[in-house]
Image: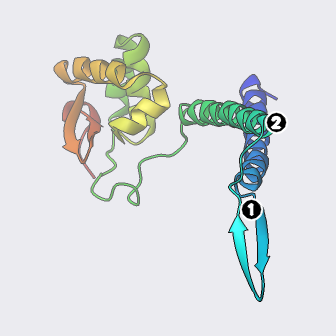
Amino acid sequence: MSSEMIRLMRCRTRLMLAAGLIILLSIVAVNMLLVSAPVVIQIEGDTFKVIEIPYSYTTKDAYILLAAGLLGGISISQILICIKASNFAPSKIKVTEKTAPELVTVSQDQSNVDVILRALEGDERKAVKIIVENGGVILQNELVNYLNFSKAKVSRILMNLEKRNIIAKRKYGLTNHISLAEDIRGEVK
């Protein structure tokens, strides 16, 4: 079993424990906060009056609520850490007609792609390789997830690739549609 799988399993366990703890702490806090106020019944002749006495929390109640809040905060932070860790793991989802109807898969001249990949180094090579693996087209926000880089870094990489006519970039909603340049990809299907 890979270290990534072990890490994800541990994260999932922490996530389940944290969610269970939040539910338990919520029940305790709600039960303490919704304690009904004591009442006094005053009888005067043939009539009676119900007088509600305001409930005041004890020091013990305050400590219990404070501890519940602290443990709840820790649990929420664990949940957020696990969610963040799993969101930045490379996604296996490829751009398809269902997620982006007007994106067209392009055919690539493999010899051009191989030459480009050999000429590129480091992060730019990774970015182009992912674009090629996705049929020559990808959305920029998906590329950010695949590369596990910041949005700014991916934007800089794409700007450099666009200046060198390796990729073409066009606006697509709140993100960009990234595709290999026409010279590299050959003709569009």
Quadrant occupied by the N terminus: top right
- What residue did someone put label 2 on? 60
Instruction: Please name the residue shown 55% across and 41% down the image.
Output: 92
Q: Position of residue 147 (x, y in %)?
A: 47, 26
Q: Which mark is residue 21?
A: none
Which residue appears farthest toward the front when viewing the image? 45
Tell me where residue 188 appears, x and y as whole percent: 24, 48
Q: Nearer the viewer, residue 10 or 122?
A: 10
Circle 1 SS class = loop
Q: Nearer the viewer, residue 189 or 6?
A: 6
Residue beneath disc 1: 36
Identify which residue is drawn at 41% across, 22% down.
150
Q: What residue is rendered at 38% in x and 32% in y?
A: 110
Looking at the image, residue 88 lies above or below residue 56: above
Tell me the residue at 31%/26% (across/down).
112
- Visible in this render: residue 33? yes
Disc 2 residue crowd, few under 14, some 14–19, many 20+, Cα 10 Å: few
| 139 is higher (above) or lower (below) than 184 | below
Q: Is residue 138 left or right of residue 94?
A: left
